[in-house]
Amino acid sequence: MAAWESPQENTCTLEAPPASTEWTLPSDLLLEIAARSDISTVVAFTLACKLLRSVMLSPSFIGQLTQRGGIVPPCILAYLHTHDGMDDPPAPLSLVQPVTPQLSDFLSNHISPFVSRFAGDLLAEHVPLTSRGGLVLFQRRCLSDNLSNLCVYNIFTGQRAFFSDPLGVGPKYSTWLPRYVLLTAEDGIDSSFLIFCLHHAIDERYRSTIKIHTTTPTSSSWELAIMSHNNNGSFPQHWPAIHEKFVVLQGGVIHWVVRKHGEIVSYNVCTMEKGTIKLPGPVINFNGELHLGSYYSHDGKKLLRLLTYNWLFEISVWHQLSNGDWASEAVRIDIDEKLQSVDPYGQPYRNMIVEFECSSENSNIVLLRIYTYSGNSTLLIIVDLETKVIREKHHCPTSSSMLMEIDLSSRLRAMEVSHP
């Protein structure tokens, strides 16, 4: 249906060194220099020759770069900013969490200029829907019947692939917008990426119908799976109660929370199997904020993590265990001072709305968004569930900005980082 289109400018060319090439410095000394420098130097070294590239992109060396205290964190959280043809558009990426000056420099002087150069038209004409693993799914701002309205873009390589809308998807077919999920090869699917579309429609007999469409770069069209009609008990029967945020586990299994019925529903994109998981007992009738995330167990298995927030300023964390049970951990946070900074002259406890913005898939970072009912002020609370450190960041992204997680270690391993 669509194939990757590479940017016209060739950013680098790798050539094998002549057989007679010798190291000016011992290889172990070069690797030690790279490991103690910054990410820009690492990328430059990997572009120097294939011999350096093969050694520096090995799992052991990547581990040195991304372990605690390394020059590259396992992942970063950043906002992707789009614009509607502004004369002076913002930088495409802005970091959320505190980072080293070297990493900030790499983002602002290398990745952002590269995205601006090769995705300037996308940022002006499209809005981001979702992202995973450095890939972003865009939708055209002004939908067209004659143009491809969807585009998957790789922020590190500049490659893009365009797709038409799934048949029967759009405002004229439903009162609810379709929900998209972007899966990558690291999720266990047999493709570089897969677009999943879940939407509510009315069929020719005026029945309420839930449909699922999927497509990949090599598909000739969207594949359709009809999930349920009216109240026949099939997933996902209760459309309005399903949270928009999702979690993907290994094997291409997508999870959503249906809080009205105290359960998590799942769908396997590879086998088309449906499933349900009961929420922890104390969470079933919970009245505060609830968020579904994920974490990695000690044996490297990716499992579900459930977070709740109550008006006593307490986050509770529930970890799904390998046997399917849930284990809880209470994290007490005190954000009185943070609330006062948003509304210093008012009554913050009455005037604030607190929501989960996101939780990192590859770290213990959780973001809470706090804003006033009037919408005049907004604040991000960054919570590290491991260290219990709380930070605040004033940030007012536009409605067409999207928070995305960039896994730098996997991007280095795949060597998809290019100089602008």
Image (cartoon, rainbow, N blue to C red):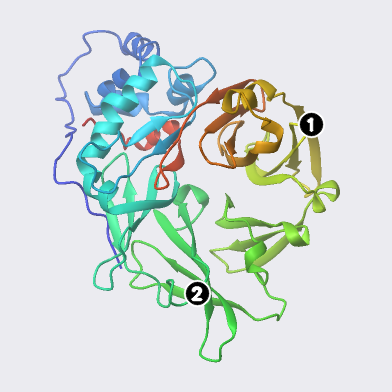
The one of 413 and 70 positioned closer to us in this rendering: 70
**Where residue 221 sits in the image (x, y, percent)?**
36, 73
> What residue is drawn where x is 40% and y is 72%?
166
Residue 21 coordinates in the image, percent (x, y): 16, 18
Helix or strand or loop: what does disc 1 sit on?
A: strand
Q: Residue extending furthest bottom?
A: 205
Asked whether residue 354 is in view, the answer is yes
Report the side of 30 relative to 376 (left or right).
Answer: left
- Helix, strand or loop for disc 2: loop
The image position of residue 92, as x and y in percent, is 32, 37
Q: Which mark is residue 286?
A: none
Indicate left or right for 211 with 140 as reference.
Answer: right
Quarter of the image for residue 382 reads top right
Tell me which residue sits at (28%, 66%) in the image: 148
Q: Quadrant of residue 229?
A: bottom right
Q: Nearer the viewer, mark 1 or mark 2?
A: 2
- Marks 1 and 2 sit apart, C-alpha to C-alpha, by 41 Å
Q: Could you tell me the amino acid type at mark 2? A: Ser
Task: Name which of mark 1 and mark 2 comes first in the sequence.
Answer: 2
Image height of 78 relative to 245, above or below: above
Q: Which residue is mark 1?
A: 330
In the picture of the structure, the residue carrying the numbered disc 2 is: 174
Residue 301 visible in this rendered orientation of the protein: no
Residue most extreme to the right:
281
Does residue 51 appear to the left or right of 229 in the view shown? left
Looking at the image, which residue sits at the far front?
A: 345
Q: Residues within 10 Å of mark 1 (few under 14, many from 20)?
A: few
Q: Amino acid at mark 1?
A: Ala
Specify the quadrant that holds the N terminus. Answer: bottom left
Q: Position of residue 153 (x, y in %)?
A: 32, 49
Q: Do the residues under discs 1 and 2 have CB atoms within 8 angstroms?
A: no
Residue closest to the eye, 142 or 108? 142
